[in-house]
Amino acid sequence: MSLTETISLSLKAKLPAGLTRDSLKARVFRGGVWMGAGSLTEQVFRFTRNMVLTRLLAPEAFGIMAIIQSTTAIVQCLTEVGVKEGLIQNPNGDKEEYIDAAWWLAMLRSLSIYVILFAAAPFIAKFYGNVELSKLLRVAVSGLMFEGAISTKAYVALKQMKFRRWAIVNHGGAICGVLTALGLSYFIRDVWALVLGLGMESVGRCVLSYIVCPYLPPLRWHGKAMRDLLHFSRGVFGMPLLNFIFMRADVFVLGKLYSPTDLGLYAMAIYLVQTPTSFIVNVLAQTLMPTFAHVQEERERMNRILLQVTSAIFILGMPALVFLVFSGHSLLTLVYGQRYGAGSTAMIVAAVIALLNTANNQITTLFYSKGMPQLHRRCVAVMAVMMVLLVYPSARYFGMVGGQLAALACIIVGYLFQIERIRHVTGLKLSDYRKSVAIGSVLSLSGVAVYLLFRWIGSSTRPIPNVLLGILICLLTYGLAYSVIARGRGRGTSSVFEW
């Protein structure tokens, strides 16, 4: 027996039996490994890029880029039709006529985005008093044309749980853009390096989609398939715009009230939290959407998966949140430089929002998989209205951190709204859900106690020792959580692997 075979058999022996078969659980586990590896690689590249670029470019460049991305996102939201989600959720989504109809829907959407933003660019530039913003917007939005032209068979690969192909397309394209931005930053020391890098992400995804999932776009589409996909999009209609208001209203308001430099410091601080969070959210959404779709008629099974994923989110997230509370300023100083430490308070609030939003997204994914996106739309509508009412006074009264404080109030209300909704969809018991949240919260208290002990005995507050101490305490908390879960499984009281 070769060394490779020996290692493979050894690893299989250590895994639970259910993960080595071709069950739904095993397919999700293997898919999660591919998606996780791809997304982790992408986030490592993004993190490295940010570390380098914050030392090469002025904070003003990141502030302008935040405005560009937010402006582009609002038009994307206005034209969102849920092509990918519609194909995955529809039982006929892997048929040729549906694939063709989805390609045309995506392409027409991209064309509309380009036309709207190209015409609106001068007015947006005038609003922010930055003439160059018009050219930057027009170049940035051109990349979205390639996003719309992506091979829709890549979406089918995701529906069929062929996660390796989607990971190559999605994360491979993103890495192309990151490398482009890094390379250009040595020659173009301004925001253009970021804009061109963003465009290359879309180009990379488009090219890779046809290499990995070959497809010849049709000259016509099937009417019934188009109507079926648009029927799903009616439930999605308006929701991306409402979600955008919740997610990005702070950038527009802060960009108007404060300088691009202040906005750049703020944006990079919260991006430090949003980068790993987007990794987790993307992996979970892209693996759990087809998973829930496979068991959408089995309510107990859906509840069990939801509870286990939610429990894992809080077990992993709460110690990380404690780490940022005590070591966030040191982390920003170490990663970006001394001046970025001013954004530590905003980063901590953003971390709380990210944790709640990640848990909330799992309920959203369940709604989508059952073909009920309109249930989530009501939640997002509540959050959007609250954000509109709160963001300006919060930003005026609390300063830069006010944008995140407004978002925190919104996500708390929206999350509670969704928890109440899920009871009527799957019959989920609130006592079970509270238990899944409480486990991670209680375990994280041990990390708080250790931090306070070290502060009491006078540990160093210099960036590197403080960050290393935080990492060590996180690892100890995770070790404690693992031992508690393993002990419960040994007693037969845990169902972590029982899907």
Image (spheres, rainbow, N blue to C red):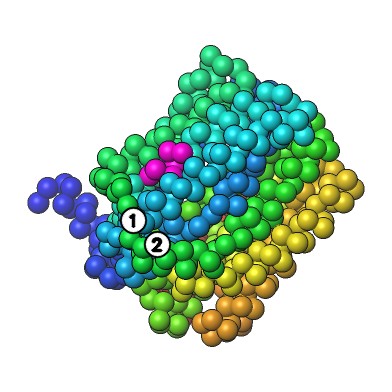
Q: Is residue 362 visible?
A: no
- Residue at 39 percent of width and 62 percent of height: 226
> Is residue 149 found inside the magenta-colored segment of the image?
yes
Helix or strand or loop: what does disc 1 sit on? loop
Helix or strand or loop: what does disc 2 sit on? helix
Compare residues 59 and 102 and report the one nearer the observer: 102
The residue tagged 2 is: 226
**Disc 1 to disc 2, how far (Cα)?**
7 Å
Compare residues 480 and 11 and report the one nearer the observer: 11
Q: Residue furthest right?
A: 397
Three-letter amino acid code at the position of disc 2: Met
Q: Does residue 321 appear to the left or right of 33 in the view shown?
A: right
- Residue at 58 percent of width and 82 percent of height: 423
Q: Residue furthest top?
A: 187
Percent from the top left, x then y, of residue 233?
A: 50, 63
- Residue 266 badge: none
> Is residue 388 found inside the magenta-colored segment of the image?
no
Is disc 2 surrounded by few (<14), some (14 to 19) or many (20+) residues within 10 Å? some
Q: Does residue 458 appear to the left or right of 229 in the view shown?
A: right
Cβ atoms under marks 1 and 2 closer than 8 Å: yes
- Residue at 64 percent of width and 78 percent of height: 420
The residue tagged 1 is: 221
Q: How many marks?
A: 2
Instruction: Compare marks 1 and 2 and give the one earlier in the sequence.
Output: 1
Mostly what secondary structure, the magenta segment? helix
Is disc 1 surrounded by few (<14), some (14 to 19) or many (20+) residues within 10 Å? some
Which residues lie in the magenta part? 145-150
Percent from the top left, x then y, of residue 372?
A: 52, 73
Percent from the top left, x then y, of residue 281?
A: 52, 55
Q: On screen, 371 above or below 62? A: below
Q: On screen, 490 above or below 383? A: below
Three-letter amino acid code at the position of disc 1: Trp
